[in-house]
Amino acid sequence: MLLTDLIRELDCSCSGTTDVEITSVVYDSRKVKKGSLFICLCGSTVDSHRFAGAAVRAGAAAVVAQHSVEAGSASVVMVRDTRQAMALISAAWFGYPAREMIMVGITGTKGKTTVSFMIRSILESAGIKTGIIGTIGAVIGNRTFRTENTTPESYEIQSYLRRMADEGCRVAVMEASSIGLRDHRVSGIQFDYGVFTNFSPDHIGGNEHKDVQEYMACKSLLFRMCKTGVVNMDDQNWQGIVKGHTCSLETYGFSPKAELIAAKEELVSRPSFLGVRFDLSGRLNLQEVEVGVPGRFSVYNALAAAAVCLHFPVTEKNIRDGLQNVKVRGRVEPVPVPGNYTLLIDYAHNALAMRNILETLREYRPHRLVCMFGAGGNRARSRRFEMGEESGKLADLSVLTADNSRDEDVMDIIADIRTGIDRTNGKYVVIPDRRQAIKYCMEHAQDGDIVVLAGKGHEDYQEIKGVKYHLDEREVVSDIINGKL
C-alpha cells in the first residue's frame, strides 16, 4: 500500500514523500525489511524512537514518530501519539475489517471473558459465526490463537479481525481492558455495543494505573467509542463508568429499574453440573433459565450476554441453550475425575478473584473446600499476602505451589503467601512442584470435596527464569488418572 493511503485518517505532518510503497507495518525494529513502515512506540521501559535510525538502515521506507528522530532520507510522519496512529494505520493496512462485522466490546474488572463466551455460545446456537479476542486468546471457529495480553496490540487486533471477517464471522466480541483502552489498542474501531460488567479496584500501581480514578477513566473510554452501551446498573460505580458517554444506554440487573431484570436466582448442583438458575423479565420474559457456570455472579454475566444478544435474530431457545451449555476454558472449569468429588480449574490469580471463587464455591456446601495456588513472580508482593489471607480464611485446606515464578525463587514467593495465611487459622501444605501439588490434591480428596486449582486457568505453560515450559493442568489430571505421574 502507499503511505498516503495508510495515513489518510491521521492528524499528522510529514517530511518527505508520502507517495512511497509500504511492504509491511512493524513496531519492532528487529522485524524491519525493505519498504517497511516503522512505528516508534514509547514503552514503559524502552522508547523505540532511538531505534529509528537502525530501522532506516535496515530498509524502512518511512517512520512514524511523536518526537524527533534520526531517519536519514526516509519519510517521517509526525503524530501526537504513535500508539493511536498505529491503531489507525493497522486498520487501514488490513482493510478496515471491523467495518465488515458487528463489533461488541466488553469492559469491567471481572466477567469479561465469561460474558464473551456466553455471547458467542448464544449467537452460534443461532447460526451466527462469532469470533472472540480476549484473555484466552483469539478464538475463530474451533481454533484458539494465543495472545500476549487481554487486549493485544492494535496491529494484532486488526490482523485477527481480518482473519475473522475472511472466515465468515459476522460478529466479533472483544475484551476491552482498561490498559488496552488507555493505550489506544482499540482506537479506530466503532463498536456497535459496549458492555460494562462491574468495577472494583485492581491493576493499580507499577506500569498499570496510578490510582482508581485513572482506572475508572480508562474503562469509561469504551462508552465514547460505541453506539449502544449495555451496563450493570446494580454496580455502584456504573454512573462513573458512563460519565461523558456518547452512546445510548441500556441497563440490566436485579434492580426493578433495569430494562432486563433477573429474579429468583438459586444454585443448581447435580452430577457434572454446577450452575445457577433464575427468571428473566423486562425486555425478555423467561422462567428458570439455567447457566452452566457456578456462582450467583454468573447471573450478571448471563444478563449482560442476553442483553446484547437481544439485538440479534435469536430465539428464546438459543438463549437458553447458549447459557446452559457455555464452556469457558479456565473459568471455574470442571474437569472429570473418577472420585466422588469435584475438581475445577480457575484463573483466580489475585485476592479479589480468590475471594470471589472461594465464596462462590462455599455456597455449594462442600464437605471440604481445597484451594491449590501459587503467585506470580516479578509482581507486587502485597498480592501474595492478600491471596494467602483469603485462602486461609475461606478454604479448609490450602495447597501452596508454584505459578509463574518468573525471575524469583518459588520458595520466596511461597514464604510471602504463608505470611498472609499465618494471619488466619487456615491449614496448609507446601508442595512447590505444581504437578505434584495437583497429584496431592487428587490423592487426598474426600467424598463431597470441591478442589479448585487456581491461578493458571486457560494457560498451558509455566514461566520460570525467562523460559516458558508446557504445563496444561487438564493433561496433568489425565496423566495422574492414567498412572503416568
Image (cartoon, grey):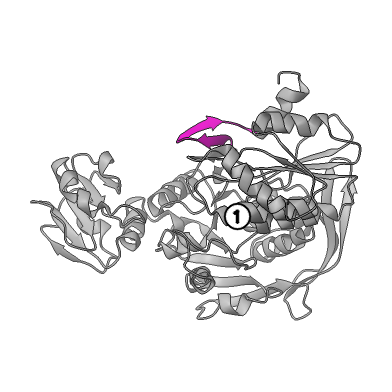
Viewer-proximal residue, 50 or 221?
Answer: 50
Question: What percent of the width, then of the height, locates residue 11?
Answer: 26, 69
On the question of residue 2 being in view, the answer is: no
Viewer-proximal residue, 395 or 289?
Answer: 395
Above or below, 132 against 196 in this view is above
Residue carrying label 1: 383
Q: Is residue 46 left or right of residue 211?
A: left
Viewer-proximal residue, 287 or 87?
Answer: 87
Question: What percent of the width, then of the height, locates residue 140?
Answer: 55, 43
Assess whether residue 115 is covered by the magenta stretch: no
Main SS of residues in magenta:
strand
Residue at the left extreme?
A: 73
Looking at the rendered image, the quarter that the C terminus falls into is top right
In the figure, residue 257 lies in which quadrant?
bottom right
Report the magenta residues as a range.
460-472
Of helix, strand and loop, which one carries label 1? helix
Q: Is residue 81 left or right of residue 361?
A: left
In the figure, residue 355 lies in which quadrant?
bottom right
Viewer-proximal residue, 326 or 319?
Answer: 326
Assess whether residue 464 is covered by the magenta stretch: yes
Q: Residue at x 25, y 44 (%)?
A: 29
Question: What percent of the width, then of the height, locates residue 26?
Answer: 29, 47
Question: What percent of the width, then of the height, locates residue 102?
Answer: 53, 59
Label 1 crowd bin: few (<14), some (14–19), many (20+), radius 10 Å:
some
Residue type pointed to by label 1: Arg
Q: Residue at x 39, y 56 (%)?
A: 96
On the question of residue 200 being in view, the answer is: yes
